Amino acid sequence: MSDNDLLDDYLNGDSDLSSLYAASQTEDASPSAATDSAILAAAKKELGTGPVATPRPSIKRWAVPFSAAATVLLTTTLFLTNQHEIESIPTPEAFAPELPALDGAPMRQSSQDVSIQSDTDTLKTEAAKADVLERLDLKKTQSSQPAVAVPSSPAESAPAKLGKALRKAKESREEMRYRANQAPPQPAIRAVEESQSGLTSGFTTPAEPLKRREDEQFSDAPATAGRLVEHKDLIGFRESPTQWLQVIRDSLAAGDLNTAKDEMAAFVIRYPDFLIPTDLKVLIRQ
Amino acid sequence: MDTRTTDEALMLSYKDGSYEAFETLYSRHKAPVLRFYRRQIGSSAAEELLQEAFMRLVKARTQYTQSASFKTYLWTLVRHVLVDHYRKLNRSLPESYAAVDPDQIHADERVEPDLCADQNRQLQKLLQRVSDLPSAQREAFLLKEESGLSLPEIAEIAGTSIDTIKSRLRYAVLKLRAAMGVS
């Protein structure tokens, strides 16, 4: 018989060992009376103090269900309130114009873009200040004119000087605005201009577009402006959709189709909701 | 109480406030538990452990649920008391519980055989051999003989695998049979 067979016999109760051991179980294995009484007394005492026999008051019986129901109600109310408030907050995407997906064009505004935009704002502010100062100077000039004007030069009369001052002020103002407007436009528009004009084949390195932007900003004849029909009298034309469209129309009339298309693409991005005139719709690229 | 009433029903009755139910339970189980303790640790501390085990049962009255058999519940409690006793003495379980060498028995694991009530010579010899077993094997053998539980139930009580209990029992049975000269 193998060990396993012996064990199986033992586990089945067929073993002589079990029979022999069973004989020992007939012995008097009672604990002492003191132990018996101590255990039984403890059992009896436990019954006297036990909480099982006493019925729970109804308020305690309903405390847990009421608490659970209140918790569920509170949680649901808070959740729904928060959900309603979250839905009522407009998302940033609602304000941003939809931009076309451009291959390789950077869609995020980099820190350099922010810096350039900041410079543009500063220039615009300076232009406005200069405008105000010039108006003040003009008023001073007018008020300080003597009743009987004594011309400083025999060739210039008072109206001529006034006209000269006005022209100078206008030129100064326009120069400031020109500088402000020559700062790079929004990154997405710039990306469209660059990618569509064929200047770049995609941004491979971050330094390349940055360098080009700097060149555009500080050159006297920016690439975009250089490709347009001369509109020096319409500096800042992009601020007005009708003027911009007129410039595009002029470019088209002058035969500069690529420039007209580029400008139209930029126009659509800048003014996505503006109704495009029928004669210019041909420039919109699909 | 009816002798046919199950242990589980008796414990639930005691939980509901029946003192008689506990008396019946106590009278049913005190002898095997006492024998288990006597043969596992000797007669000196057996009654003390018996009292501690039943005190714990009394205190656990309100938490008792009929999720397992009462025997498993009681013998788990009995074994916990024994383990606490070991730890109080040695701060750990006896070496044989590690099952490194099943034949190894340390001096502190030996107990005086419980021979006082046994006149039969063969039985005395068997009890002597039982007391010579390592603690872990002796525990498995005594749990099997005294509680009448199955192998999975013993494994659950001992907090180990069925294979371990089977192995301990195999060693115990082989040693006892060899010592008793049973073919």
Image (cartoon, coloured by chain):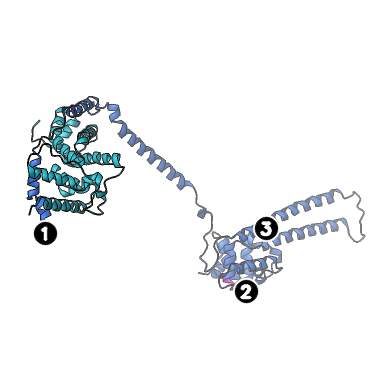
Chain colours: A blue, B cyan
Q: Chain of mark 1?
A: A
Residue denoted by label 3:
A119
Going by the numbered disc 1, the residue's amino acid type is Ser
Which labelled disc corresponds to residue A256? 2
Position of A286 relative to A135 (above/below) = below
> Secondary structure under badge 3?
helix
Is A198 inside the magenta-drawn segment? yes
Spatial CA distance of label 2 from label 3 is: 32 Å
Q: Of circles 2 and 3, which is in front?
A: 3
Determine the residue positioned at 7% across, 49% down: A16
Nearer the camera: disc 3 or disc 1: 1
Residue B21 pos. (x, y %) = 14, 30
Residue A218 can be seen, yes or no: yes
- Tell me which label, 1 or 2, sits earlier in the chain: 1
Mark nearer the N terminus (2 vs 3): 3
Q: Which is more N-terminal, label 1 or label 3?
A: 1
Q: What's the amino acid at mark 2?
A: Asp
Residue beneath disc 1: A2
The N terminus of chain B sits in image quarter: top left
Tell me whether marks 3 and 1 sit on the same chain.
yes
Q: Chain of mark 2?
A: A
Magenta stretch: give its range.
Answer: A196-204
